Image (cartoon, helix red, strand yellow):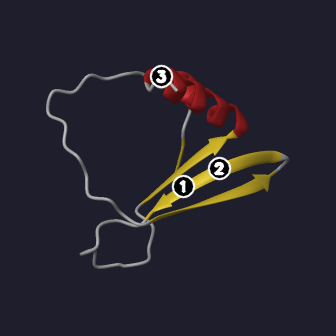
Amino acid sequence: MARIDVKKIRREDKYRNTIHEEVESTYTIFEKNGVKYFQIDTYGKSGRKLKGQSSQVLQLDESSVHELVCLLSEKFHI
């Protein structure tokens, strides 16, 4: 599991980019110790042996959600 610290996220220019296969994903919103979280779970490629088990879990608290929305809005001119 990974909780993203968006305030410390940095841009990295890569020279060999690929488009990944779309995978099943879900999200949940929950509160723990008075802090609200947005969590995204991805479930891997269709040929995966352990179907239904999450591959990656990303968690953002309210502050990180705000930072990420601002960053995406700026980079995609939304």
Residue indicated by mark 2? 38
- Compared with 66, 75 (above or below) is above
Q: Secondary structure at mark 3?
A: loop
Q: Using a 10 Å C-alpha cutoff, classify the residue at mark 3 as few (fewer than 14 neighbours), some (14 to 19) or many (20 or more).
A: few
Residue pictured at 29% horizontal, 67% vertical: 45
Number of the front mark, 3 or 2: 3
- Compared with 68, 23 (above or below) is below
Q: Position of residue 35 (x, y in %)?
A: 79, 45
Number of the front mark, 1 or 3: 3
Q: Depth check: 42 or 8 in front?
A: 42
Residue indicated by mark 1? 40
Q: Secondary structure at mark 1?
A: strand
- Compared with 6, 20 (above or below) is below
Measure the C-alpha gap from mark 3 to mark 2.
23 Å
Q: Amino acid at mark 1?
A: Ile
Q: Using a 10 Å C-alpha cutoff, classify the residue at mark 2 as few (fewer than 14 neighbours), some (14 to 19) or many (20 or more).
A: some
Measure the C-alpha gap from mark 1 to mark 2.
7 Å
Q: Amino acid at mark 3?
A: His
Q: Position of residue 36 (x, y in %)?
A: 76, 47
Left or right: where 59 falls relative to 52: right
Residue pictured at 50% horizontal, 60% vertical: 41
Determine which of the numbered discs, if any, sits on residue 77 in the image.
3
Q: Position of residue 51 (x, y in %)?
A: 37, 79
Image quarter of residue 44: bottom left
Q: Amino acid at mark 2?
A: Phe
Left or right: where 27 falls relative to 36: left
Measure the C-alpha gap from mark 1 to mark 3.
24 Å
Q: Are marks 1 and 2 in contact (CB under 8 Å)?
A: yes
Can you name the residue that lies furthest to the front here? 78
N-terminal of the pair, mark 3 or mark 2, is 2
